[in-house]
Image (tube, grey):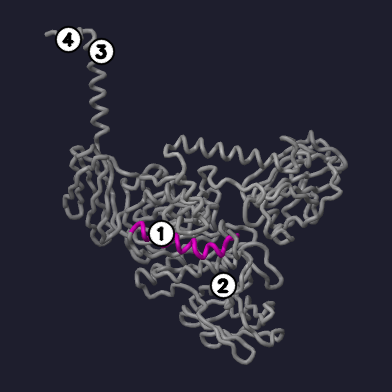
Amino acid sequence: MKLHGFNRSTLCKVLPVLALFLASSSLFARVTLPALFTDNMVLQQQSDAPIWGKAAPGKNVSVVTSWDHKTYLTRAAADGTWKLKVNTPPASLNPYDLTISDGKSITLHNVLIGEVWICSGQSNMEMPLADWGKIADYEKEIAAADFPNIRLLQVEKSTSLSPQSDLKVSGGSWKVCSPAAIPLFSATAYFFGRNLYQNLNIPIGLIHTSWGGTLVEAWTSEQSLEVMPDFADYIRELKKMPAEDTQRTNFMNQKLVDWKNELIAKDRGFKGNEAIWAKMDVNDAEWKSMLVPQFWDEQGFSDFDGVIWFRKTLNIPAEWQGHDITLNLGMVDDNDLTFFNGQQIGSTEGWDRSRTYIIPGKFVKQGKAVITVRVFDSGGGGGFHGDKDAVNIYLSADKKINLSGNWQYAIGFNLKDIPQPILTQNTQNNPASLYNAMIHPLIPFAFKGVIWYQGEANVDRAYQYRELFPLLIHDWRKQWNSAFPFYFVQLANFLPQKTNPEPSAWAELREAQANAMHLDNTGMAVIIDLGEGGNIHPKNKQEVGRRLALLARNKTYGQNVVGSGPVYESYVVENGKIRIKFKNTGSGLTAKNNETLKGFAIAGPDHTFYWADAMIDGNEIIVSSPKVEFPVAVRYAWADNPECNLINKANLPASPFRTDDWPGMTFQKK
């Protein structure tokens, strides 16, 4: 038989290729599932749980559930997408199978039915048991993390300028909780899930999707953000972007390059690309002085964003000459460019990262030396901050020079004169970018509720957070069409303690978080007693997870446990004193360790606060001070790192609060 256009030799070559093509086409046509659906997963109990994926357009797709042997049918749409819902039974410790087929089957094994929680936020939610986290007793906790009925799904970090349909998942699947699987998982999420499992005795599924240092608006959808005037311009710019990803990236990159070039061109500290203010012989006679480390917002620059150059002159001992030495600058908000005797020795981005730079011995000469630091702040607080003992230069532990105190400074430029283009890059802090990549692909997966630990990145815009945070909760509930439980962590105490009552952006952010409890089916875990002044990532994540679990056990699962500490309710002024009424007092108010109550401050009509005497009277607190004849306001734990000790008899701390509504230090900051 003769085949037109083919001889035997050609046919022998074509057939293997054709067979490979047919095999690959068949493989491509097989039904596919998002990364959410794998072996070892947990499905939400007693729900109509959505299952979805892709198949060849028009293909019939079936899902068979082994717990009831039912078959659910649907057909793939013209774009290949399909979705259906399966009825899940009450929670069970028995594993099941889930078989999905479009003619060729995929079977998911070891599937549990239980309670699923989404765990999200920034670095304190992200903080793993081991690795950079190293929580308290992490080695012991990891060794004990043998809970086969707790399952873990780790969403990988990703950003997008448009909503995505699938996730990137660490390891490609759900993991069974074990000492091997737990070290890099969220510690807060794990301890929350462990407490639920130990008290409910049903499977727990934890979907962890968080990213350190991120803003709340990054986790909120474009549709919700565009109703806020503060973000309307950004959303309009986003809608003008090219639709294709590569074109979008090129468009943004060019805008960013143009802007950065403009910053250098208008920075008085540069001439061309040369950092002239870093030279040793620069004329700094007109430079002024500023304390380091201390935010410049606290030194007369409360409304300044941009670049300030700092210089510090010191004498290098003869024995240091020719040796590598170490420079520590503490933390710098936001970014620094650091020079030693005119030579650039390092740069770091990130307001909460410590700066440590090695100065090569070839630059180290006896006598006069000049350290120059160009600090760029794009919004909120700016400058050096942290422990003054962390700002130093040394050859060895016993040969160290402390550099805290007065530094000379000069302004490079004010960012108001060179506003950043609204949309210059796809980063984790772009509005909606994390929602698009790390939340939207979860929709419409069935789950019980959300735990959330975030807010540090929004501290400088605490008043705005009053709207942004409830908006996020409303947004997610709207996307899932469910008023699911939403439990969150109020920020811990952080930064050095202050001697006298004074304004605090951290207190204002905590207040904004507390305001979100006006939303139905929410709860707040107070951890004002768990922080570490010098560490924004406190190590006791066991207690954070436990307190979140107490909220869930009390409010969601109806267990007879006290879910939270005392919460301010109202006040009255009587006979030169203010009487404070609380809710959530449990079996009564008390002071930790039965000490004298601490953390209360009181003010009169002059708005000046003084530390106050506070006395427990049943479930109320009476606050007064001989310095305030006619009191009009009380504040409790109103500080970055307050000394406070009001608890209920369940040993849960009272939430910080104030009775006044006087504008704070973040008022009108955007």
Does the magenta run of residues contain 473? Answer: yes
Can residue 640 be found in the magenta stretch? no
Which residue is the site of mark 1? 475
Disc 4, SS = loop
Q: Earlier in the sequence, mark 4 or mark 2?
A: 4
- Nearer to us in this view, 234 or 13: 234
Instruction: Kindly check if marks 4 and 1 are in contact, taking CB atoms under 8 A apart as contact.
Output: no
| Mark 1 or 2, nearer chain start | 1
Q: Residue pushed farthest left?
A: 1
Query: Which is more N-terminal, label 1 or label 4?
Result: 4
Which residue matches tag 2?
656
Counting other residues with Cα less than 10 Å from the Cα at mark 2, is it few (<14), some (14-19), or many (20 or more)? many
Residue at 66%, 40% in the rendered image: 262
Frontmost of labels 3 and 4 is: 4
Callout 2 amino acid: Pro
Asked whether, in this view, residue 209 is left or right of residue 423, the answer is: left
Q: Which residue is mark 4?
A: 4
